[in-house]
Image (cartoon, coloured by chain):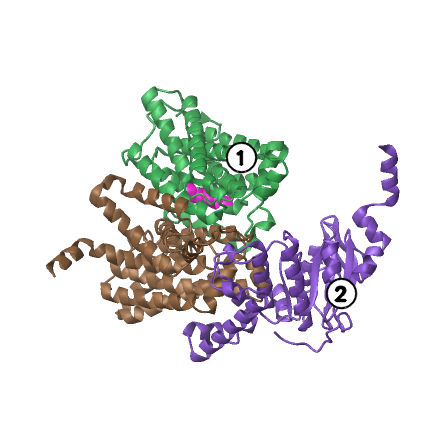
Chain colours: A brown, B purple, C green
């Protein structure tokens, strides 16, 4: 028992941060899995985080109310964003969402009443690891159900070949819109989770740094299965801590190197149903590539 | 597989698809220049012509990927030239592609299931929640998909990754996918391209079986031998225009068609005299 | 009036840095189809290399600039060949390139941190032109003149290259469709290398000039330039050199005037609101092509 407590003292915060990052990764996965590259999760996280923090600071709302509020706020923001900016050209959404991240920071800096401005906000509540784990479990369950239902199947079709999908009656824009709203809900919860973990948030918290790590973590874990983002978040969060124990100087570089290795050797990520199926099939014939869109997104 | 009321003898059914003076330009190029043609219900109709004749453009116009600059397209009596691809699918037109376009990462069964989207019978929400009705409909859809795979002879490969199949097998899966939503008209864009004669005749026989069970098929082909063997009637195009219509045999005898494929007799004579 | 003109020139010079960087970033995005998260590091490294050429080898100002420019170009080519080229072979698409660029930005930023010992370095006095040029009404620092001229020369030169020369046509062809371009006889390998070199050199120029002007040679320099350069690209039109240059200048001027006449804390805000307005009202930017936003 003592050993467990010792381990927790040493690595507990890593576990907690891994869980928070898992929300962000799932939010990114939600849109990536329908073929959209977007950094908007940061925006949803900021909205959810600041809203939750203010609710608790001003109205003493309990956590089990603050989290759903963050989820709803994130979902609404996503709906607005998707309606305004979702176009089928993939390059466009990437640029636009990156711009929105920048704008969010500026808005956050210049609305001190909402966000505490440059000084940030102290968050007078903490989410326990158990509470986070329960929420994460719920989120994972949602993605598990999505994966094994009609939505999961047609998501893959929209991602791989939206033109062909539409000639089969599958509506790519509507599917991507739904995916965005899901991303917003999970992202909002993640933002609140971050707020209740750090207990201090500022416009710097929800910015480019986490935008890039979210996407990187999701792709590393695998964006073709709901388990991928969770695994990716864990690995991406645990990696610097592990490296730090051995060679502290190269902590950051290690992250970059690992990412690079994954993109070269496992471009579809650690968890990839297709790779598993290919392994099964390789016991028979050599694979013949499908002449469809070959993009990873 | 729905059975329609058309008689089983080909080409005597009502007109299912009608193109009237369809024009489509891309920049300065007239891909389709005033094409008028018909496809009778319950037939296998060939759309043939040399490379660049505009055949795939016609298919894209029918399926709503492009809209004609002028002219109209009628399906089952309704004007469809301005519908979106998803709407075209909903009224009963399905297609396959020149280069097989199956979805990467999906098994054979999953490919066909995506084709069954329009007849899934349950909302996405109910499916997500896993309600009993949704599960029942899913099982039914799955059974339908397996049945389609049996029709094309691929049922025993249902759980394999579609990418690992041979080209001919992938083509059959693609056809099964196109049948998923019980279409009335199936458009096959060069279904036998890249196949040897054995594989090609499998596709041809499949086309006949599908026709006999009530489906209408429009097949783009530029191999005249295959057309003669598998098509009841055909439309011959060149440079975006109609060259000939009728049975394959009649079309082949048409001097314009001969010239399109084999060149002018007078040119042949002249070349011979020069060498 | 004097203040107004001085600030106008300040803004123009600052905006020229944004424009220069944006041109490089936009080249990679439009021709190579890559949203390059590592692009800022090219600017940082150009500044660092220029700095070391001066402090370690006593290089004169023009040489320092040349080292920076060349350094930026070489780093860009290296990253392109090590990171992006393998992905082209497997057709990984924009996502794969982005993730890899993130990886490289992490690595290069870390290395830059080591190189500058996590400090912000300044070019020593006397190693670059510091005098004021008397234009009658106002006096302008030489560095600002140099920066403004640099953008004008580079933007015109690159625009001319892309629009009027064969190699430029080749670059545009590769930007539209690499396979089709290759089938049409374009040596896409050469085009890619050239584009990377040019993009790195241009952003490198922004880096070394910016590092000198703002006395901030560090990895943060690149990050700052990237955000504003990115805004210049979106506002100007991602595939138009003139648009990016003009947008960069405008953004610089707006930023300086907002800081001067409204409030310093709002200086970035205005830039990004401008960005948002363009995203909503005119997604293709000032001069960008319409195809960008359609499927």
Could you give the CA–CA distance between mark 2 and mark 1, rounded to whole angstroms? 50 Å
Q: What is the quadrant of residue A230 in the picture?
A: bottom left
Q: Quadrant of the N terminus of chain A?
A: bottom left
Q: Chain of mark 2?
A: B
User: Which numbered disc, 2 or 1, marks the residue closer to the eye?
Assistant: 2
Query: In the rendered view, would you say C184 is above or below C143?
Result: below
**Residue C287's x, y, as percent?**
58, 45
**Residue C249's x, y, as percent?**
50, 39
In this rendering, position of residue A278 left or right of residue C245: left
The residue pinned by badge 1 equals: C189
Q: Which residues are magenta?
A: C226-233
Q: Is residue A74 visible?
A: no
In this rendering, position of residue A56 left or right of residue C223: left
> What secondary structure characterizes most of the magenta part?
helix
Q: What is the quadrant of residue C100 in the picture?
A: top left
Query: In the rendered view, would you say B181 is above or below A176?
Result: below
Secondary structure beneath label 2: loop
Between B73 and C196, which is closer to the camera in this rendering? Answer: B73
Q: Is residue B138 visible?
A: yes
Between C40 and B261, which is closer to the camera in this rendering? Answer: B261
**Residue B251's x, y, as percent?**
82, 58
Q: Chain of mark 1?
A: C
Label ID, residue B232:
2
Query: In the rendered view, would you say A239 is above or below B249?
Result: above
Query: In the rendered view, would you say C176 is above or below A108?
Result: above
């Amino acid at each position: 028992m003592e050993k467990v407590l010792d381990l927790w003292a040493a690595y507990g915060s890593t576990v907690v941060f891994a869980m928070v990052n898992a929300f962000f990764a799932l939010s990114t996965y939600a849109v990536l899995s329908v073929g959209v590259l977007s950094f908007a999760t940061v925006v949803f996280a900021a909205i959810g985080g600041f809203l939750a923090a203010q609710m608790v600071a001003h109205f003493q709302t309990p956590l089990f109310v603050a989290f759903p509020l963050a989820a709803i706020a994130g979902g609404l923001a996503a709906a607005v964003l998707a309606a305004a900016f979702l176009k089928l050209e993939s390059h466009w959404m990437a640029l636009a969402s990156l711009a929105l991240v920048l704008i969010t920071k500026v808005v956050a800096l210049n609305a001190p009443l909402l966000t505490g401005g440059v000084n940030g906000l102290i968050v007078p509540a903490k989410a326990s690891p158990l509470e986070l784990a329960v929420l994460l479990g719920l989120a994972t369950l949602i993605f598990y159900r999505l994966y094994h239902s009609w939505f999961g199947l047609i998501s893959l079709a929209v991602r791989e070949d939206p033109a062909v999908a539409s000639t089969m009656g599958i509506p790519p824009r509507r599917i991507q819109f739904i995916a965005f709203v899901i991303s917003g809900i999970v992202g909002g919860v993640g933002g609140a989770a971050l707020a209740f973990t750090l207990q201090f948030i500022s416009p710097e918290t929800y910015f480019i740094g986490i935008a890039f790590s979210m996407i990187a973590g999701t792709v590393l874990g695998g964006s073709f299965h709901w388990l991928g983002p969770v695994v990716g978040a864990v690995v991406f969060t645990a990696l610097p801590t592990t490296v730090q124990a051995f060679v502290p100087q190269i902590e950051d570089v290690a992250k970059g190197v690992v990412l690079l290795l994954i993109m070269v050797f496992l471009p579809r990520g650690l968890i990839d149903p297709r790779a598993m199926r290919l392994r099964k099939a390789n016991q028979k014939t050599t694979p013949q590539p499908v002449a469809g869109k070959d993009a990873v997104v | 597989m729905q059975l329609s009321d058309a008689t089983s003898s080909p080409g005597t059914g009502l007109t299912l698809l009608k193109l009237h003076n369809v024009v489509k330009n891309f920049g300065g190029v007239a891909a389709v220049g005033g094409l008028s043609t018909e496809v009778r219900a319950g037939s296998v109709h060939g759309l043939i012509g040399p490379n660049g004749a505009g055949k795939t453009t016609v298919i894209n116009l029918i399926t709503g990927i492009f809209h004609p600059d002028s002219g109209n397209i009628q399906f089952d009596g309704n004007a469809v030239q301005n519908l979106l691809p998803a709407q075209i699918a909903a009224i009963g037109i399905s297609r396959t592609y020149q280069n097989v376009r199956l979805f990467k990462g999906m098994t054979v069964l999953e490919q066909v299931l995506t084709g069954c989207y329009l007849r899934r019978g349950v909302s996405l929400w109910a499916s997500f929640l896993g309600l009993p009705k949704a599960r029942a409909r899913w099982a039914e859809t799955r059974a339908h998909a397996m049945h389609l795979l049996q029709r094309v002879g691929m049922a025993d490969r249902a759980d394999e990754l579609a990418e690992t199949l041979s080209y001919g097998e992938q083509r059959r899966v693609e056809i099964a996918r196109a049948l998923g939503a019980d279409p009335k008209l199936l458009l096959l864009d060069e279904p036998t391209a890249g196949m040897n004669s054995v594989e090609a005749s499998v596709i041809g026989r499949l086309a006949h079986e599908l026709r006999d069970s009530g489906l209408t098929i429009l097949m783009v082909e530029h191999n005249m031998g295959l057309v003669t063997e598998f098509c009841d009637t055909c439309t011959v195009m060149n440079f975006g225009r109609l060259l000939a219509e009728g049975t394959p045999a009649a079309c082949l005898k048409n001097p314009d068609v001969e010239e399109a494929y084999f060149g002018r007799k007078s040119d042949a004579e002249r070349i011979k005299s020069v060498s | 009036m004097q203040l107004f003109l001085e600030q106008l020139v300040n803004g123009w010079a600052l905006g020229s840095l944004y424009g220069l960087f944006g041109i490089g970033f936009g080249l990679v995005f439009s021709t190579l189809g890559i949203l390059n998260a590592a692009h800022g590091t090219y600017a940082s490294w150009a500044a660092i290399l220029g700095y070391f050429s001066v402090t370690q080898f006593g290089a004169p100002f023009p040489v320092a600039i040349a080292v920076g420019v060349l350094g930026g170009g070489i780093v860009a080519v290296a990253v392109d060949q090590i990171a992006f080229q393998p992905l082209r072979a497997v057709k990984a698409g924009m996502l794969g390139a982005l993730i890899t660029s993130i990886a490289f930005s992490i690595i290069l930023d870390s290395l830059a941190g080591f190189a500058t010992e996590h400090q912000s370095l300044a070019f020593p006095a006397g190693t670059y032109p510091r005098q004021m040029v008397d234009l009658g009404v106002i006096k302008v620092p030489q560095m600002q003149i140099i920066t403004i001229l640099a953008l004008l020369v580079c933007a015109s030169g690159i625009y001319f290259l892309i629009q009027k020369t064969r190699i430029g046509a080749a670059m545009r062809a590769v930007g539209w469709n690499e396979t089709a371009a290759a089938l049409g006889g374009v040596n896409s390998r050469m085009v890619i290398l050239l584009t990377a070199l040019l993009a790195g050199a241009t952003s490198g120029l922004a880096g070394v000039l910016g590092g000198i002007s703002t006395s901030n040679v560090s990895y943060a320099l690149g990050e700052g330039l990237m955000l504003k350069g990115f805004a210049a690209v979106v506002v100007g039109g991602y595939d138009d050199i003139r648009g990016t240059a003009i947008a960069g200048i405008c953004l610089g001027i707006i930023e300086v005037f907002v800081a001067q006449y409204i409030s310093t804390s709002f200086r970035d805000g205005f830039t990004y609101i401008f960005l948002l307005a363009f995203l909503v009202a005119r997604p293709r930017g000032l001069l960008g092509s319409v195809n960008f936003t359609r499927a």
